[in-house]
Amino acid sequence: MANILQKKNKDGELFCYINKSTKKGYYVIFDRSSQNKYCEKVFLEGFDNLPSGFYTRDGIGLTAAGNFIFQELFEKYKKKIHLTLIAKGSAKLDGRAKLTKARLPHEALTVVNAEVRTTKRIRNEEIKAEVRQFLAANFSTQFKEYKSATPRYAGGTLAEALDRKDMLSRLSDEDREKLEDFIPAYLSSIKGTLKAKNKLKVVFDSLDAGKKVYFEKIIKEFNQKLKRSTQSESIWQKFLSNYILVLRNTYGEVLEKESVSLQGKFPDFMLIDPYSYLDIYEIKKPTTVLLRFDKSRNNYYWDTELSKAISQVENYIHQLQRSSDILITDIRKNKGIEVNIVRPRGYIIAGTRSQLKTSKMLDDFRILVQSLKNLDVILYDDLKSNLEAFVNRIG
């Protein structure tokens, strides 16, 4: 009998029988149960123990959604149900025979049971809140604490929602906004000290996981833009305006010309570091040609467009230093930010390293960059590679 599982109620009545060798059995629904009028016995296939979803102390029947499932099937076909619960396989339903034959995967039953329990918990909290409001309205002295009663969160609701396999794909914009507000609040609520390493690890791991997902999305968008056949400076200016603080994480503030109502020739794009020093950024396209070859001298020189950009940035640096007092005042007035303008550096984001196809080009590019005064040229793929390396370090 070691291979036979039998369950009896307190009166000694057998309500569950399973042959562990064949993994087949049945569950009896006694006639004193309200479910008996729909189904007298549930057959089991693929189980060596009584699966979840049944009342385990007596033959009352299925829990949670079970009674509703029986009701709907009975209303549909007007006859009793021959239900088989299966460990593996797909659902099948046939209402042509004397009994309605239904085969139901246990996993599907588990999912709907969880949803029904969540609904019941939420509904119970709503009913409780309504009753408390009723008591406060009719017995205001005795139940004044219930005057503004509202439904409380039903514990376990979130856990069941997060356990759903399709949850991420079905999140609405509102769901995402609420999660973005909730996660930082939850992390800040975890109380821990340096001694409570497990709690702190939860915080740090969650932060790293969140950063990694966010950075990977930026990298994906970066790659998509780089692959486009047509490139636009305005599109790259908008993209870098949104993500430059991630790509160049030594800065703390993005400052655009329009946001401070500057008059005169100032750069459209400036960054402020943690020490309030201001730098200039000029945005060109990834397709911007970097170098041209001089056959007579056997070396490379800046392409015309990049040479113009270098000259423009040098003029910006000169203008910023000459009008630093006016600029500092405008930024303080319009943005409420204190800045220091002391030998600002200029950066041009343009081109890609794939243009530098030979060691000669690489060497000459390095020489040309190092010859610039207070100015540097940053390649688009280098900008992206730095973020990718950081994501890899997060692990």
Image (cartoon, helix red, strand yellow):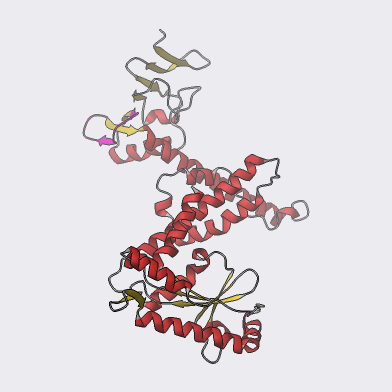
Note whether 138 is above or below 161 in the view shown: below
Residue 292 left/right relative to 114 = left
* Residue visible at 58% across and 50% down in the picture: 126
Which residues lie in the magenta part?
Answer: 85-99
Q: Residue 12, how many percent across, how many down? A: 49, 12
Q: Residue furthest left?
A: 96
**Where in the figure is residue 267, as x and y percent of width and height?**
51, 83
Q: Is residue 244 left or right of residue 127?
A: left
Residue 203 part of the magenta segment: no
- Residue at the spot 57% in from the left edge and 65% down from the top edge: 250
Tell me: residue 299, above or below residue 160: below
Kindly indicate the quadrant of the structure image that contains residue 291. bottom left
Q: Who's the residue at 27% across and 31% down the image?
A: 101
Q: Residue furthest top?
A: 1
Question: Vertical placement of 312 versus 245: above or below?
Answer: below
Quadrant in which residue 196 is drawn: top right
* Residue 22: image location, x then y, percent: 32, 16
Note whether residue 346 is visible. Answer: yes
Quadrant of the image containing the N terminus: top left
The residue lying toward the viewer, choosing from 391 and 82, is 391
x and y percent of residue 10 in the render? 53, 16
Query: How many circles with numbers are drawn on the protein?
Result: 0
Judged left or right of residue 98, residue 16 is right
- Residue at x-position 34% and y-position 66%: 360
Q: Magenta stretch mostly in which secondary structure?
A: loop
- Check the image and name the residue furthest to the bottom: 264
Q: Is residue 151 visible?
A: no
Instruction: Point out the residue furthest to the front here.
Output: 297
